[in-house]
Amino acid sequence: MSRVRSDYEKTLWRKIVRFVNGENDLFDEQSGFNIEAEELDARKRKLFFEEAEWNKKKVQITELIEERSEESEKKAVRLYERFYRLFAVITCVAIIAILLATVVNLPDYGDASNPVNNVVSRKYIEDGIEDTGAVNIVAGMILDYRAFDTLGESHVLFIAAVCVMILLKIDPDSEKGKRFISLENDRAYEPKNDPILVWTTKILVPVIITYGVYIILNGHLSPGGGFSGGAIIGAGLILYLNAFGFKKTEKFFTQKTFSVVSVSALLFYSVSKTYAFFTGANGIHSFISKGTPGDIISAGLILPLNICVGAVVACTMYSFYGMFRKGGL
Amino acid sequence: MAFPTNFPMISIISCLMCGVVCSILKKDKARYVTYGLMILLLILSGGVLSYTISVDSEFIYQMGHFGAPFGNELRAGVLEGVLAIFFTVIMFLSIIAGEKHIYEDVEENKINLYYTLICLMMSSLLALTYTNDIFTAYVFVEINTITAAGLVAVMGSGRAYFSSAKYMIMSLLGSGLLLIGITLLYDVTGHLLLSNIKEAVDTIAIKDYSEPFTIIIALITIGLSIKSALFPFHSWLPDAHTASTISSSAILSSLVLKAYIVLLIKIYYRAIGWENILETGVNDIVFVFGIMAMIFGSIFAIAQKDVKRMTAYSSVAQIGYIFMGIGIGNTAGIVAAVFHIFAHGATKSMIFTSLGGIKAVSGHSTKLADITGAGFRNKVAGVSFAVGAFSMVGIPFFPGFVSKLNFASAACEAGSVKMIVILVALAISTILNCLYFFRALIALYTPVRDMAGELREEVDNTRPTVKYIATMACFIAVNLFAGTFSDLIIKLITQGLKMFS
């Protein structure tokens, strides 16, 4: 007969037996779940006091840690940091080396016999104008041949705007919003009345916005299109806002304008493209004519879609700025 | 062309349109629009599935007036139909079950934006399922990435912002690698449609550009495994899943991770070619990491004190199962992996939503010490957590058991080394699963005697709603269906995979 050990209750086996009997937690004997409610309550109360104590002592403790932390611990941390940095550098260098080695083995740039120069790109270049009616081949590609990708891409912009709204939008009626408006609002300093800025804006903004509109409307004829033109208009609006302040821009651009413009643009995009996909896939004749290539009103759906994309991009750019400035439009 | 072939296009675009409309509606109307959309999607996906079964073949849907290889394409077979139904059902149940929590957790004027995110997330899930074009897949991967980070950040707490930023950074790293892979693939093949890429791979890429081709496979695999949280890249997952509201956790864990795995299987089968994967041995590497994820995910889960975090780590382990199945290298392994996508999706979303009910009666905490006795306070949530735990551990009649069985039988068809490793890993992982899930289960059903007055008030205020009970019943029914009628699902998966290649 072997003797019962003095620390028998503490052995792993007894712990497992107690765990199987549902008496205690296997890994954390203290905070096991077999506790009475009063004890739970008391523990919570204790925790509350402990937390208060902790908050008081926090500063002291950090000081103590700084003083007392032994040399070896410091060394370990330093070693870890060094290893971490070293590892990061090694990984990056390895990835760069692998990618460079890959690039060397890729097809030569500009070689006519490359796999990229196949029937697809030949068709885009040779039949592009005939197929889509757009003189600008890129516009024909992104808004007609591969329109579904662009539909997704414009929703990426929209979803980015929604996420920024979720992060930064402030409800002026809520507690948090009121505090923000009273404390961190920089609108009190508006308008800035900076003559250089105001006069430059007065001269530049009409030109910028006209140029943006030109790029959008001419997207199917010359380089450009909805994305680039929209970005230019957005930049013009932001410049105007900086010079004249929110009071003036709110006369023509509010939250409501943003919703109406971007929602109707995206809905028009989706509906018209559904029609195009449906007729295309089922072999039905589409009533949208391609017009004469080179005319301003030609290329079927490409011009209206460019306008839609431009509107969405301009609104998104402006709303980003507005959100970052004051948490709303 | 038969009319049901239009359904994939209509379902994706209706998701996009509903998402856009939700952004200007009031919160309740946005909710109704989303629920209506889900019902519409169920009908459309059911139409796709029944059509593909009746004609017993896949169909290609040309997006626009230009056929392959010039325009975009959608493609649907049996597997896509089943996946679309599965994604819709789980999404629908998750948002209904977490409805009360969405209204509590999200700021008043941002609830409609939450539903916008849900609709757009749904569009990306469907597009990743249906697309036959690798660049369309990338565009919708972007939508998926941003909406997923938004679903975490919408909570508005500091922890949520932190986790969301971490998630975003890791996820974008994955997107970046995927994008590099896609561009290189385009460079050596000259096509973007999956079927055309496959042809070009067989004729050009393998012979002339074998080194870049290996790198491409590696980049795409690493990129997508970062996004679906395979073991060494899992660090973002527990934070993101713990900090978000209940519905978001369920969706992130059951659907978002799975969509990337579906895309990976699709690229392996339809663009790169399964035999090329076997030749390069990428599947063996995936296999090793899958096995590691199975073991380490469970060990991390055991160390957790918070049940929600524990469940999140359990997802890491289950993702390991799926990658292990892909790595086995035979068709049975892929079938088992795809079945586990369903099994884990159905079960994990149920566990997360049941934790919502448990949280409500435990003083808004999911700490192991606080949920003591919660199974008596919210009986529905307790029962569904128990069903989920049984499924994850692998008890017969639940889907987890069937997928473990499938993995084991797939292992027996593989080589002897892999077979031994898989069987041992399955055994260890099952024991570890038991340890942490049953610990939580025992805690749930340990009665708290002499309830303090404070606590009792809380209990009365948070009685589960009829809607919650009905949803959880649906969840349990889905799980029992997947567990008992697994033959039917496996038959459909096998049929779908045959259409794939």
Image (cartoon, rainbow, N blue to C red):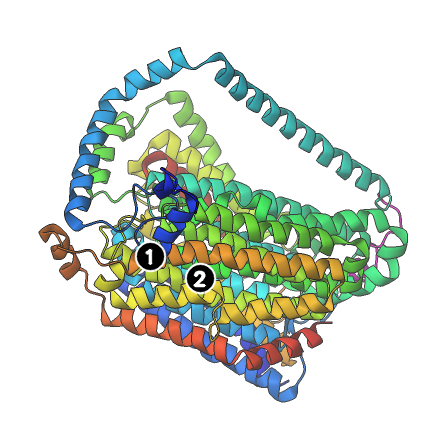
Residue nearest the viewer, comparing A14 with B208: A14
Write the start and end of the magenta stretch as one range: A109-124
Q: Measured along the vertical axis of the image, is residue B105 above or below residue B94?
A: above
> Which residue in the protein does label 1 denote?
A21
In the rendered view, does A67 fall on the left or right side of A132?
left
Residue in the image at 56% along x and 82% along y? B488
Question: Where the N terminus of chain B falls, by quadrant?
Answer: bottom right
Image coordinates of residue B466 in percent, x first then y, are: 24, 72
Q: Measured along the vertical axis of the image, is residue A120 above or below residue B364?
A: below
Image coordinates of residue B204 in percent, x first then y, are: 87, 58
Residue in the image at 33% along x and 62% along y? B354
Q: Is residue A232 magenta?
A: no
Q: Chain of mark 2?
A: B
Q: Main secondary structure of the magenta part?
A: loop
Total count of labels: 2
Is residue B333 visible to the viewer in this orientation of the structure? yes
Dot 2: element: helix
In the rendered view, does A256 fall on the left or right side of B492?
left
Q: Measured along the vertical axis of the image, is residue B30 above or below residue A310?
A: below
Q: Is residue A122 magenta?
A: yes
Image coordinates of residue B131 in percent, x first then y, are: 62, 66
Residue nearest the viewer, comparing A166 with A22: A22
Residue in the image at 49% along x and 75% along y? B483
Whether labels 1 and 2 belong to a single chain: the reply is no
> Which residue in the protein does label 2 denote?
B348
Is residue A211 visible to the viewer in this orientation of the structure? no
